[in-house]
Amino acid sequence: MFKILVVEDDKDLNRGVCSFLNKSGYEATGCLGAEDAYDLMYKATFDCIVSDIMMPGIDGFEFVKTVRSLNEDIPILFMTARDDFEAKQRGFRVGIDDYMIKPIDLDELFLRIGALLRRSKIASSRRIEVGGFVMDADERTAILDGEEIPLTQREFDLLYKLLSYPKKAFTRQQLMDEFWDVDTRASTRTVDVYMTKLRGKLANCTSFEIQTVHGLGYKAVLK
């Protein structure tokens, strides 16, 4: 059974999230702040962390930085009332994997945790293999049927993200938040340009396709 650590100073929300996750097949443990989380992590191994940002004492950003210095692979999801670009950008920079805005839809949280846990298995090997297509995050290579496909760093990161969460749709803004600098002047339509380039470079790939989700963004669908 996967163990989830919930770090949230709102006692009612903490209790509600843990109760829901426990009923959904996970083993959830709640704590009200980073210091308590450190103690729990010293005593037990967790498979995923769900954390608030605004907490007394050590905030979510500093908490994630500390966790990442000790564990590069554990999935971390921010669950926060902060809906500003700066907070999202800073969160991804310190090492989170996903970001949800309060009030939280618990069913969506369940789905996202499941996706993160699947993603963590990929992260441990740092490779994605889909049919004849292989991406190696350490080597920064993309190989299709034995031949390397030249990808820029941003093209590689975007494609790796989509293939890490097959069938999951990402909005243009989500991708901008993660892969573009906070002070960029580019519009979200820049994402469209990159997806067009990726589709062109992967025209001969029959293992998956990058689909447009109209009015939303993009997703990778395996064939």
Image (cartoon, grey):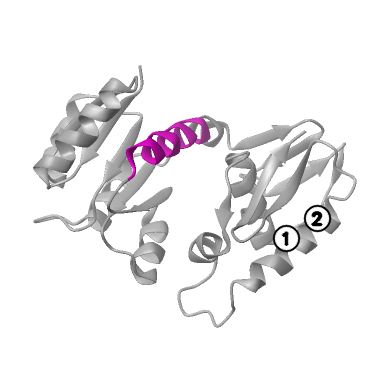
Instruction: Tell me if I can see residue 74 in this picture.
Output: no
What residue is at 78 percent from the left and 63 percent from the top? Answer: 196
Does the residue at mark 1 contact the one at mark 2 (Cβ under 8 Å)? yes
Q: How many marks?
A: 2
What residue is at 55 percent from the left and 60 percent from the top? Answer: 175
Residue 116 magenta-highlighted? yes
Helix, strand or loop at disc 1?
Answer: helix
Amino acid type at image mark 2:
Arg
What residue is at 26 percent from the left and 46 percent from the top? Answer: 51
Nearest the camera: 21 or 121? 21
Query: Is 139 on the left or on the right of 50, as rendered?
Result: right
Residue 3 magenta-highlighted? no
Chain part drawn in magenta: 105-119
According to the image, label 2 marks what residue?
A: 199
Residue situated furthest top in the rendering: 1
Q: Determine the main secondary structure of the stretch shown in magenta.
A: helix
The vertical placement of 209 against 207, above or below, is below
Instruction: Point out the image quarter for the N terminus.
Output: top left
Q: Quadrant of residue 216?
A: bottom right
Query: Is 101 on the left or on the right of 165, as rendered?
Result: left
What residue is at 55 percent from the left and 83 percent from the top? Answer: 185
Nearest the camera: 162 or 172? 172
Using the image, tell me which numbered label, if any, was put on residue 195.
Answer: 1
The vertical placement of 184 against 39, above or below, is below
Residue situated furthest right in the rendering: 204
